[in-house]
Amino acid sequence: ERDLAREAYRHGRQQMQACLRSAARLVVMATGLLMILLPLLLVLLESDLDISFLHDIRQTPEFEQFHYEYYCPLRRWFLCKLELMTEQLWGD
């Protein structure tokens, strides 16, 4: 009975490890896709491309709110930090 219990425990532990590895892969893939697709979408939406579906998205109140309340301040902050770093590196 003891051997059967150990074998069942080992088998259950292996299944749990496989499930955790699968969940970790899913999280890594989803994060990777978000890190690639979200900036790409922002670049497309901020570009001057005159494509009808992009124009429709740009005109929505949700996008305008996101643009003015989050994107513009984040862009200004990022450019300011980048300028400070370049000044420190090259001493301008």
Image: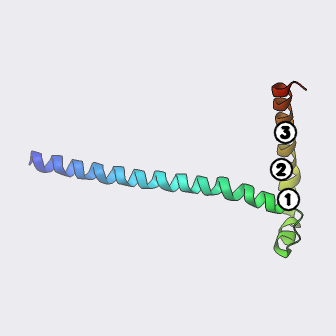
Q: Is residue 89 above or below residue 53?
A: above
Q: Residues within 10 Å of mark 1 (few under 14, many from 20)?
A: few
Query: Which three-letter amino acid code belongs to the residue tagged 2?
Result: Tyr
Q: Secondary structure at mark 1?
A: helix
Q: Which residue was labeled with disc 1? A: 46
Query: Which three-letter amino acid code belongs to the residue tagged 3?
Result: Trp
Residue furthest left in the image: 1
Residues at discs 2 and 1 in contact (Cβ within 8 Å): yes
Q: Is residue 81 above or below residue 9?
A: above
Q: Which residue was labeled with disc 3? A: 77
- Of the two numbered discs 2 and 1 on the same chain, state the one appearing first in sequence: 1
Q: Residues within 10 Å of mark 3 (few under 14, many from 20)?
A: few
Q: Secondary structure at mark 2?
A: helix
Q: Is residue 84 above or below residue 28?
A: above
Q: Which residue was labeled with disc 2? A: 71
Q: Secondary structure at mark 3?
A: helix
